[in-house]
Image: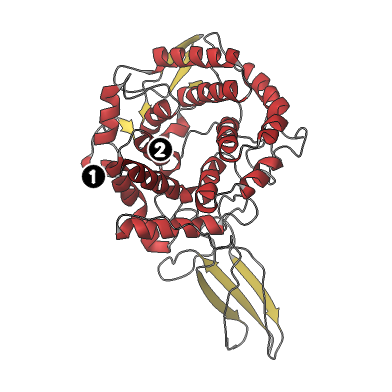
Amino acid sequence: GPMTLYVLFDEILTDNQVDFLRMDCANAIRFDLGGGVHKLQLFEVYTMKYVQLTAIGGPCEVQHVGMVEYKHPPVPRQIAAPTPGLQKIAEAAVETFRQNAVDIFMDCPSRERAGWLCDSFFSGRTEYCLTGGSVIEKSFLENFLHEDSYEFLPEGMFPMCYPADHYDHWFLPNWTLWLILQLEEYQQRTGDRELIERFREKLERLLRYFQSFENEDGLLEHLEGWVFVEWSKANELVQDVNYPSNMMYSAALRTLSRLYDRPDLAEKADRIKATVLAQSFNGRFFVDNAVRRDGRLVSSGECTEVCQYYAFFCGIASPETHGELFQTLVEDFGPDRKKTGKWPEVYPAAPFIGNYLRLEILQRYGYRDKVLDNIEGYFLHMAETTGTLWEHAEVTASCDHGFASHVLYWLDRLEKTAAQEA
């Protein structure tokens, strides 16, 4: 007789059940069926690691359940990893890349299959590393040129996520700074100067937008929208003057000066760097923000781990200029800090983006063993649990996040450096 069949699915099991509402979306398909034999097919491009079938209203027998995969073709490149644990992580990273690189770089195949800036900076590196090309990256970047302007965004602003932009006037100013950094790396990978030229006018409009937020010190103050530093305490310290955002602003201006031969922007980047150093560094750590009190800017005194990484990533600090801080970060911070309890006054970093910036800096300055050790410390439990790499350190959100495939880039760089030294 008639009955209703629910197909429930998720990436993980919760108490040995599928919690189809785990990620604030309904991972459930409903079939209303009459009697007889049915052959059902559904096209929901989701991450369906576990499937639970629930029949309501009558008995039914299921004879076969199968799946057609929809992901990037197998990649030719095998990245050698020096330990079994790292090999497992590398395989999980390839799987993560393939599920998130079907037509453009996706956030994740489960909750939202949308293309976000910043994440794409990392995914673009992975694509080139695995395929030797930047086909998907070019498609991804060209999306941001399709529209001349956006109805729901301020003049000059790019959407944070296209073509799934938000209609609630919500945008992420920091992600446009990552776009600038990505464009330079894209040009280095491909030699495609034409795409860079097509971005010129839009980026000039973006600069005019940011200029309107510069305070008397030349720093961005009270940025609108979703000022995103990372998924940690840092996101509560974003006003009124946020130093990580200004560090990124300095790095983006320096990048634009190289891309479009604008020495004036390099000078401006230097001025911002000098001001951030004077205001943010307290002698031991960089402070995240300053707030307006009675018309004056006052340091909040709050420090986060990720703020330190932004300083080194953006060229505000280096091991030469801030040697003591750098050694503290190398030795006392990282995956074990929860256990050791060192520097409790500095709020810990999250996977995105602090742990990535940490690994990037360690790799940049040649800390090979530390990079490998930290990659295992951060990612092995993910690879062992789901065979993919996640958005957060816990299974609270997506367990298959596109940018996380970037560990392949570090393994690749370390492999190449070792080969050169040999």
**172 sits left or right of 415 in the view:** right
- Residue at left offset 54%, top offset 16%: 266
Percent of width and height locating residue 356 = 42, 41
In the picture of the structure, the residue carrying the numbered disc 1 is: 339
- Residue at left offset 68%, top offset 42%: 165
Query: Few, some or many C-alpha atoms within 10 Å of disc 2 (few <14, some 14-19, many ≥20)?
Result: some
In the picture of the structure, the residue carrying the numbered disc 2 is: 360
Q: What SS does tag 2 mark?
A: helix
Q: In this orientation, does residue 156 appear?
A: no
Percent of width and height locating residue 247 = 48, 23
Percent of width and height locating residue 324 = 26, 23
- Alpha carbon separation for disc pair 1 and 2: 23 Å
Dividing the picture into quarters, in which one does residue 143 lie?
top right
Give the farthest residue toward the left.
340
The answer to which of marks 1 and 2 sits earlier in the sequence is 1
**165 sits left or right of 302 in the view:** right
> Can you tell which of label 1 and label 2 is closer to the viewer?
2
Relative height, residue 215 to residue 245 (above, below): above
Q: In this orientation, does residue 64 appear?
A: yes
Q: What SS does tag 1 mark?
A: helix
Number of numbered discs visible in the structure rendering: 2
Query: Few, some or many C-alpha atoms within 10 Å of disc 1 (few <14, some 14-19, many ≥20)?
Result: few
For badge 2, the amino acid type reads Glu
Relative height, residue 363 to residue 93 (above, below): above
Q: In the image, which disc is placed on residue 221?
A: none
- Along the line of sight, the residue nearer the viewer: 91 or 187: 187
For badge 1, the amino acid type reads Lys
**Do the residues bearing badges 1 and 2 touch, measured as CB atoms within 8 Å?**
no
Q: Quadrant of the C terminus?
A: top left
- Along the line of sight, the residue nearer the viewer: 127 or 122: 127
